[in-house]
Amino acid sequence: MAEIQQYHLTVRTNEMRLNAFRVADAVARRTFDDLERPDTPSLAIVQSAINRYSEEWDVRILVINDRARVLRDSNHDVLDSYAGQTLLRPEVLNALNRQDTTVLRRNDYALNVAVAVHDEISGRVGAILLIADVSDIFDTVAEIRNTLILYSVAVGLLVIVLVFVMSHRLIAALRQIMRVVQRMSMGKLNVRIPISSRDEYSVLSKAFNNMAEKLEQQEKTRDEFVSNVSHEMKTPLSAIKVLSESILTLESVPEEVYREFFEDINSEVDRMTNINNDLLALVKVDQREQTLHLAPVNINELVEDILKRLSPLAEKKKVVLLYEEVRLVEIDADDVKLALAISNIVENGIKYTPRGGTVKVVVDSDHQFAYITIQDTGIGVPEEEQDKIFNRFYRVDKTRDRDTGGTGLGLAIARSTVLLHNGSIRLTSKPEEGSVFILRLPIRK
Ligand code: ADP
C-alpha cells in the first residue's frame, strides 16, 4: 500500500518539478527589481503566466525573491494569499541556497516543490514554490486499502462459513456411517448408508455398502446351506424312520422282508454318509490356502489313476471311458484335492450319460496353462442351468438325481478346488448331446 502511495507521490513530484522549472524559466527572463515594482509590464506577463499555469496544472504557484519574500502568488484570495509575506519554510530556504527541495505536509496533504530561480541580470537567486493538493492520492490509496480490508473480511467470513458447513457435513456423514455400523454390529445386515453426493464419503459409503451387501449375501448363503443340509439329511432320516417303524410294528415277518427293509435302511445310511463326506470335503477346500499341500503333480498319471478307479462304474453303466494324452503336463497342485475334483466331474460324466455313451478325458497344455477336458455324450445341461450347477446342493432335476444318488455337492467341491489352485472351470453343453467341462490350471514355473 505504502509503495503505491509513494509511487504516485514520486510521479506527481517529478511532474511538479518539471513545471516549476518551466515557471522558473519564464521568471528568469525578468529581473526581481522589475517584479518588485508595481505595475511593470514584466509583472503583468509573469502574473498572467503563473495564473495560466496554475489553472492548467491545478497547483498554487509562488514566486519568491532572494530574501524569501513572496513577490507573486497565483492564489488571489486576500485572506489566504502569501503575496508580500516572507516565507521562511525549509524548502524555500533550501531553494534559495540552490537546493531544489520537495516537502510533503501531511496535515493538509500539500506537496511543496521549491526550485531555485536566477535573476540573470542581478545574479540574485530566488525561488519558485509549487504547492499541490495531493489528497486525491491519499484518498485513492485509502479507498484501495478499505476495499482490500473489506474483501479480506468477506473472504475470511466465507472461509469460516465454508469450514463450518464442511465440518458439519463431515460430522453428519460420519455420524450416519457410525449409526449404520452400530446397527450392523447388532445383527441388522440389511441396513445401508444412503448415498447423496459424489465426495470421498460417498466412495467410503459405497465401499461400506458393498461390504454390507457381501456380508448379507454370505449370511443368506450360510442360512441356505444349513437349511439345504438339514433338508438333505431329512429325506434319508425319514426314510429310515418309516422303514424301522414298519419293522417294529410288523409281527412274524419272513426273513427276506426284514432283509429287504434293512437293505433299504443301509442304502439310506450310505446316502447320508456320502453327503457327510462331501460336506467335509467342501469345508476342507473352503478353508483356503493353508490346507493346500502343493507339490509337483504329474497330471497325466493323476488322470489315468482316476479313470482306472472309475472304470468299474463305467463298465456297470456300459459307458466307454477314453483317455487322450496330447502332452505330458506337470503342475504344482494338491494331488488329493485335485484328484477329488477331477473324479467328481468324470463320475458325473458317467452318471449322466446313458448306456452306450462315451466319456473322454483329454490332457493338454500351452506355455501357461494345463487343460483337462472332460467330455461326455450324455444328457447335457440346459443353458439356463449351466451356471447354477456349480452351486451347493443344486441339481438340474431333483427327482431324477435321487436315483443316481448324487448329493449336489460334487461340482461345488470341484469348482472350489480349481479356484483354490488359481484355475478356472468352464462348461459348454447342449441337452441330449453332451457336456464339455474344461479345467484350466496354471503351469508350474
Ligand atoms: P450330483 O452329486 O447331483 O451329481 P453335482 O454337483 O456333481 O451333484 O452336479 C450338480 C448337477 O449338475 C447334477 O445333479 C446334474 O443335474 C448336473 N450335472 C453335473 N454334471 C453333469 C453332466 N456331465 N451331464 C449332465 N448334467 C450334469
Image (cartoon, grey):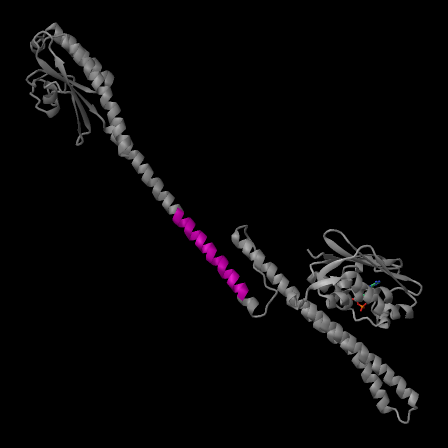
The image quarter containing residue 12 is top left
* The residue stretch that appears in magenta: 159-181
Query: Residue 404 appears at what percent x and percent y?
Result: 86, 71
- In this rendered view, identify the residue nearer to me: 225 or 117: 225
- In this rendered view, identify the residue nearer to me: 43 or 24: 24
Query: Residue 308 appears at what percent x and percent y?
Result: 85, 68
Q: Quadrant of ligand 1?
A: bottom right
Q: Is residue 240 visible?
A: yes
The image quarter containing residue 239 is bottom right
What secondary structure is the stretch in magenta mostly built from? helix
* Above or below, comparing residue 132 to residue 354 in the picture: above
Q: Residue 174: say if magenta.
A: yes
Q: Is residue 54 visible?
A: no
Quadrant where the C terminus is found in the figure: bottom right
* Farthest residue, direction bottom: 252
The image quarter containing residue 323 is bottom right
- In this rendered view, identify the residue nearer to me: 155 or 329: 329
* Above or below, comparing residue 409 to residue 103 in the picture: below
